[in-house]
Image: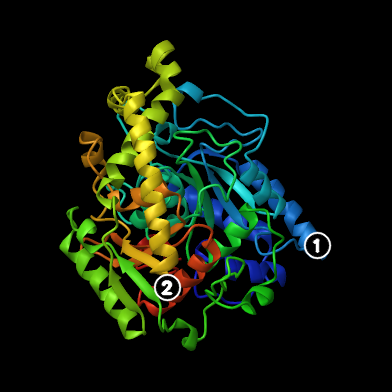
Amino acid sequence: MPALDVPLHALSIAQAGELLRTRALTPLQLVQACLARTEAQEPQLHAFITRSTDAALAQAEQATREIAAGHWRGPMHGIPIAHKDVLLTRGVRTTAHSRALEHWVPDTDAVVVQRLAQAGAISLGKTACHEFAFGSPASDDVFPPAHNPWNPLHMPGSSSSGSGTAVAAGFCLAATGTDTGGSVRHPAAACAVVGFKPTRGVLPMDGVIPLAPSMDHVGLLTRSVGDAVWMFEAMRGNRMHTHQDLAARSLGAPSPHTHAVSGSPTPARTALPGLRIGVMRRQLQTQAHDPEIWECFEEVLARCRASGAHVIDIDLDGGDQAVSLANTLIGFQGYQQLQHWVRDQPQLLGQGLRRRLVSAAEVTPQDHWQACVARWQLEQALEEVLTQQLDVMLSPGREMPPETLDALMHNPTGQRSSCNRLYSLTGHPALTLPMGLHSSGLPMALQLASAHHSDDRLLGLALRLQSSLPWDPLHPANPLFKP
């Protein structure tokens, strides 16, 4: 195996995929490295609810034999991943981080789980989340909450928390998540990884435990934008391409069928001439931002201007309602999904979830209907802006550094990461990527969003921005990443 400047567990999918394809590395070696990493760090981070060690080793041995025989399936073949514990996994328990489903073992896989397995990805297990993707960590939860690998005293973001921790800590190279109000992008922002929520409906929800069906999305967490491309290709069931095929494609072209490149683009392609960037400045600033995060965001905008982009302040009609509308829809629909547990076996729910359901029960059908109408109007207004006036919207990926887990447990209903709510509400594709480190040593993040079904173009734009910014997402200054 060639000498590497990072340990195996810190490889990107692109790096590992090429080593696997050329047989310089075997899937078994890669999986064993991730399992060793998990064994060493999991006791303090609690990223997993269920670890599938024996199955993963067996799959890795099979993948090693397949690649050795010349049957390489594509860039995800032999890549160790993990699944959020609301995605059904055949033969592996799916708990939704709840005592109510503590011992449930489904007999089927979620569609995206099937697709990733068909692409050759190897699941290492099921990751911790907030209970039924709606609750908040509490002392009486049946499983411990995930901790932030940058500082285990801090929270790693909302619902897809274990997936964010697992990817950032080097337990796996990528993970699935779900996003109803920001729960893919929020953990990505808190853990300094990339979180991608595609256009609503692009990835099927079949086999995913629902929360608010009109807002639920399946998403993914990776260490770089290029890695998100590979993961997304597999999750939507596309035939996987070679690295050379994708490298030959145009970066960030307008066509929704254009793919981003997984490697580093040439310097000429990092320029942003004529790119129209929208910033909802007034509406963003109605929420308190940490001064350091806002200063860093302004630095990003200045770099974009210097690269030839046009930064345009946008006042979106109805944008001030986004958070309240999203909360109304999630509350009403979430209560409909979970009310039978509240009615028949409330003792099986943690107090963090029960507290949320108390307020959710107060949302009336009339409230919900009015929110649906207002949501449709806001979605149309944003789509018009994104198709006629802008190429992309930018915002901070999170307004504040991640708080401590203790603070989260003592104030579970506090407003968090409201900037993520808008795109879950409207269904537009959105992505967060690292934006440097706060003076506290915790991550900051940048969020991008674009028009409906411009998912590939958004990935291309994100890759260009990632390449033009000074923060390397693959090698954060994190002692957990040291060999």
Residues at circles 1 and 2 in contact by the CB criterion of under 8 Å: no
Q: Residue at x 72, y 72 (%)?
A: 22
Left or right of residue 169: residue 12:
right
* Numbered circle sitting on residue 427: none
Badge 1, how many Cα within 10 Å: few under 14, some, many 20+? few
Tell me the kind of residue under disc 2: Gln
Q: For numbered disc 2, what is the local secondary structure?
A: helix
Left or right of residue 35: residue 248:
right
Left or right of residue 92: residue 422:
left
Q: Residue furthest top?
A: 344
* Numbered circle sitting on residue 466: 2
Badge 2, how many Cα within 10 Å: few under 14, some, many 20+? many
Which residue is more in the foreground, 418 or 64? 418
Quarter where residue 133 is shown: top left
Question: Which numbered disc, 1 or 2, marks the residue that appears first in the sequence?
Answer: 1
Any part of residue 284 in sight: yes
* Numbered circle sitting on residue 71: 1
Q: Residue at x 42, y 73 (%)?
A: 466
Quarter where residue 315 is shown: bottom left
Tell me the kind of residue under disc 1: His
